[in-house]
DNA sequence: ACGATCGTTGCGCATAGCGCAATAACCGAG
DNA sequence: CTCGGTTATTGCGCTATGCGCAACGATCGT
């Protein structure tokens, strides 16, 4: 809505790809160099970008500090983390915690697999919303109209042959997930990777987060992974309990 | 330099303190609500802020994703991390890695102590520049005029009786540090906490980062901590070697 | 030492962003 | 269920603000 701010913020993802000099930034923004300079200067004053010795700009450290604070404000993450670690110790696989934000599902925590083969994912990154087990849980809990609207709006990329193909199929899957109280992704995103996921609920019973265990076929079969379901559910319930108890809705005043 | 962007960016640290509603944001910015609304909307579109169910705004997940990417772009951090972990395994204390950015020294990596007593610090947060051992190393390597100018500009808060009291004392300390090639902070920031630090150098010999080991008096005395100096220096040198070898100055093209 | 490239500055014009005030959604209390 | 109070949202007219331009200056490579 605000042109200037819009442009300034567009610089950040651009710099996330790697350092860039003034000319490059101006060109990719489609503005004059003097304009880009002013925007970069303002970003610089706020520590959002940093100018390295060769004059090129990179993302600044204040950004990292802010993100760190943002994460510390996410109580679910703080509460959940030790549980994720324990679960990882018990099963050895990659463990994720995800939340819904606007129309995206994002990982907010991750404990890496103890097996040498890792999977690619990044904290803060949106997940494949139409196939990920955690996404199904979070969306399944949405009120009917929103769920429908969202399902309509989404794209359904066929990552693999088992990806959710379209809106109706997705809504059916969500109904199933809501009913059974857990979800899976069996090769719907990466051919050889399976996940089992369980919901974390707040005091009011609404799903506030979802956690999953993921492992590639080469380590355990889908059947073996499903064996872990009770453990995953128990862990998720433990987080739910702690979360509902400790943090109803309120927030500490500054 | 750009008013609108300036205001928009000022919202972020404000929200880092905790969620806030439109009125609060407008008031703290000193602008009309409609103005704050427009700014927040723009930030929202870029995923920098998120609007939770009670209509209040919090920091968004895109911020976290960007910060994550920013960290992955910091090659020193990537290269250094395994070394920090190994050092921590060997000595058990808290290990930090820091760089200089503009006029601030910031932690970019941290491995927590294995002892129950932890120290407070946060990745991305500026360190106490006049007393921290890592800061001394980074500033000591600055060209004479910049060093002098910076020393002049700084404040010299007396965190403890042993804090660096003023500019001249600081410059003397920096000279000493530069000559000996390592630095300490013996209770200059927190009465009971000591640090030893060593520099990481690039191919051209310039100091690009500094690492430190910190421990409270109650765990080891300052003398015992100094015993670790050779180990710290060896680790820092190992990082220097790898960094100079792998990443001269260049950068991968997108 | 010279030319090309890239960053920086000052300026006048037009637009983009501002505050205002009216409207609309929301919430709690009676 | 209705009624105040509170908070978010919209449209609008004014002017400050951010824009592109073009001239200048720094920097680098050869």
Image (tube, coloured by chain):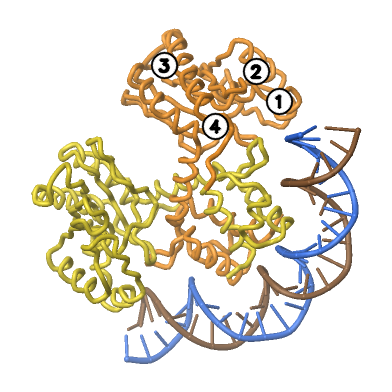
Chain colours: A yellow, B orange, C brown, D blue
Q: CA distance from mark 4 to mark 2?
A: 16 Å
Quickly name the residue at label 4. B127
Residue A113 picture location, percent across and down:
24, 39
Q: Which residue is labeled 3 in the image?
A: B217
The label number, if any, that marks residue B147 in the structure image = 1
**Residue at point 33%, 57% (across, down):** A127
**What kind of element bears circle 3?**
loop
Residue B174: give its label: 2
Q: Is residue A167 above or below residue B120?
A: below
Of the two numbered discs 1 and 4 on the same chain, state the one appearing first in sequence. 4
What residue is rendered at 62% in x and 60% in y? A29
Earlier in the chain: of badge 3 and badge 4, it is 4
B245 on left or right of A185: right
Q: Quadrant of the N terminus of chain B?
A: bottom right
Q: Are marks 2 and 3 on the same chain?
A: yes
| Label 3 to label 4: alpha-carbon separation | 20 Å
Looking at the image, residue B195 lies above or below residue A99: above
- Whichever of callouts 4 and 2 sits on the residue coming sooner in the sequence is 4
User: Is the same chain shared between marks 4 and 2?
Assistant: yes
Residue B222 lies in quadrant: top left
Estimate the x, y position of residue D28 in percent, counting from the top left: 73, 35
Estimate the spatial distance between the alpha carbons at disc 3 and disc 1, rounded to whole Å. 31 Å
Disc with the residue nearer the chain's start (2 vs 3):
2
Q: Is residue B222 visible?
A: no
Q: Quadrant of residue C26?
A: bottom left
Nearer to me, B2 or B27? B2
């Amino acid at each position: 809505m605000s042109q200037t701010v819009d442009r300034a913020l567009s610089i950040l993802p651009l710099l996330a790809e790697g350092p860039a000099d003034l000319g490059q930034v101006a060109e990719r923004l489609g503005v004059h160099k003097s304009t880009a300079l002013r925007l970069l200067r303002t970003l610089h004053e706020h520590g959002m970008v940093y100018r390295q010795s060769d004059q090129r700009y990179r993302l600044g450290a204040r950004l990292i500090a802010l993100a760190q604070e943002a994460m510390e404000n996410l109580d679910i993450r703080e509460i959940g983390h030790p549980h994720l670690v324990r679960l990882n110790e018990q099963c050895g696989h990659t463990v994720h915690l995800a939340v819904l934000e606007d129309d995206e599902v994002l990982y907010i925590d991750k404990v890496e697999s103890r097996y040498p083969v890792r999977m690619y994912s990044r904290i803060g990154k949106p997940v494949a919303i139409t196939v990920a087990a955690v996404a199904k849980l979070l969306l399944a809990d949405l009120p009917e109209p929103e769920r429908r609207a969202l399902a309509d709006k989404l794209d359904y990329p066929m990552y693999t042959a088992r990806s959710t193909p379209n809106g109706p199929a997705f809504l059916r899957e969500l109904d199933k997930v809501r009913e059974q109280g857990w979800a899976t992704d069996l090769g719907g995103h990466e051919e050889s990777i399976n996940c089992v996921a369980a919901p974390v609920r707040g005091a009011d019973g609404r799903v506030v987060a979802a956690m999953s265990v993921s492992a590639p076929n080469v380590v355990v079969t889908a059947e073996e992974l499903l064996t872990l379901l009770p453990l995953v559910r128990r862990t998720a319930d433990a987080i739910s309990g702690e979360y509902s108890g400790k943090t109803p809705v309120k927030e500490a005043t500054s």
